[in-house]
Image (cartoon, rainbow, N blue to C red):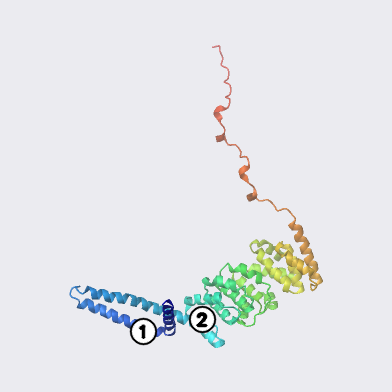
Amino acid sequence: MLQRLQRKRDKIKRFARRYPVLLFVVTFSFAMICAFVALLSVFVSDKGKDVFLTFFVALITAPTMLLLIASLAIGRFTRLSNLASQLFDPDEAKRRQAFGQLLQKGNNAVKIFVRVLNEAPYDIIPEAICLAVEGLGRLKAKEGVDALMEAVKSLDPDIRATAIWALAQIGDERAVKAIIPLLANKSRIERQKWLNDWVHEVLKTNEQITSSHFSTVGAIASAALVQLGQEDLVNAFWKALKEKDEDAVKCLKAMKEFRKEIAEALVVALNVGLVGEATNAAHLLGELWAFDALPTLRSKARALSTPEKVREVCLEAIAKLEQLSRLPMPATATEIDKSTLPRPASMSEIAVDKLPRPANPPQNSGG
């Protein structure tokens, strides 16, 4: 019996998804008939004597109206779901058409894009994931920040770059720490070529970034951070990495809030950068006291493929960090247990009445 009811329910669901318009027409017509009968019963009834008929019609009309509203919701959701499924169509033209129709839905499409990012596997049709990420960016949907932060971790350079761009369009400050480690990422963008125009528009005056990192995730990250108000960080990072500029190094040292993320970006530069960038990256890791980078520096120094210049600087950074790690940590006021220290006495805590009184001056006996 339960299985039979389950099969009937599934049939109703499939019918509602396939023929939402027909369901709407039938339900609407039935509701109008019930409403007409209800009004007719009110006018025909003799001073309320026919209460039963009125109650019966109202009892039918109420659930009918609920069914009407449900059919509208099902039809709307079905159309959105169909558009979402078309994002995974092998035909690029159909994907773009569905994407444009979803954008026209505005905020109603945000949940669809977020659902695609959370549930769809990234390796089947990455172009569909890129479209969902782009949609959240064009709609500036703050509801999609968490999903975009996960998309930034994707191994696909195009998905990662598009997610960085989308976070910059939304303008959420939480994205800054997620983007900084990607500054030196040299993975090249293959499909999302339109991002290059955006990079050049944002980084008009910074040719040293766009020239050497053109069409890479690092260039997208640099432009995104500039748009998020971190232009000083971006300029200091690249000047320190390319020129070992002392003022830039001091600027990076002063950014204690982002020191961990800057160190992660320097580790990437150490592993994938050219000899000059890798050498400066190793030097900067020592200057920034990046103790978490010690395993990477040791591995780089032991590797046979490491250039001699890079190895020397890695060994210098290792020696500096190991020496600093053996120094005692300075005590802070919060580490001292003040509850056991003696307090200075106050006048209110001294029993003045028990103190000896001064002697009265002697009085002259002779008058």
The kind of secondary structure element at disc 1 is helix
Q: Of callouts 2 and 1, which one flags the residue occurring earlier in the amino acid sequence?
A: 1
User: Splitting the image into 4 quarters, where does residue 203 fall?
Assistant: bottom right
Distance from disc 2 to disc 1, alpha carbons, whole Å, reads 25 Å
Return the x and y of residue 304 as percentages of the image width and height: 80, 72
Quadrant (top left, top right, bottom left, bottom right) of the N terminus: bottom left
Return the x and y of residue 47 as percentages of the image width and height: 18, 73
Visible in this render: residue 50? yes
Visible in this render: residue 205? no
Position of residue 29 in the picture relative to residue 206 (left or right): left
Residue located farthest toward the left when viewing the structure as drawn: 46
Q: Residues within 10 Å of mark 2 (few under 14, many from 20)?
A: many
Please name the residue that numbered disc 2 is placed on: 84
Q: How many numbered marks have been drawn onto this rendered protein structure?
A: 2
Please name the residue that numbered disc 1 is placed on: 25
The amino acid type of the residue labelled 2 equals: Ala
Residue under the image location 23 percent in, 74 percent down: 52
